[in-house]
Amino acid sequence: MAVHTSIDRPILLYDNDCGICTRFAHVASSLSKGWVDTVGLFTDRGLRIKSEFFRPSDRPDEMFWILFADTGYGGRSGLLPLAREVIRGRVL
């Protein structure tokens, strides 16, 4: 399912209860000059995105996710797409 966002930016969904994860998300956002939209998993918006994007049998809480419209990359497979979006954010 597509996550409805007001702008066409990637969403970095991360565990906002984890200090290291929160720092990782802030670094990604600042390096991309705000292009990567960071959303905590346990915020109101994060819970809404989780319910719209993932199936009930999925376990999105175990890693970070980079979401593009109807595609998501989690954990290590999301590092390259995240790096690409950080570069895109610096160029735009």
Image: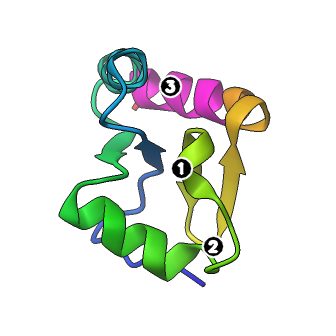
Q: Which residue is mark 1?
A: 61
Q: CA distance from mark 2 to mark 1?
A: 18 Å
Q: Which residues are magenta?
A: 81-91
Above or below for 71 versus 63: below
Q: Which residue is mark 2?
A: 70
> How would you rate the neighbour count of disc 3 (Cα within 10 Å): few for under 14, some for 14-19, many for 20 or more?
many
Q: CA distance from mark 3 to mark 1?
A: 23 Å
Nearest to N terminus: mark 2 or mark 3:
2
Circles 2 and 1, Cβ within 8 Å, touching? The answer is no
Q: Which residue is mark 3?
A: 86
* In front: label 2 or label 3: 2
Above or below for 77 versus 55: above
Q: Amino acid at mark 1?
A: Asp
Q: Quadrant of residue 54?
A: bottom right
Residue plotted at (30% across, 24% down) = 33
Residue plotted at (22% across, 55% down) = 43
Q: Amino acid at mark 2?
A: Asp
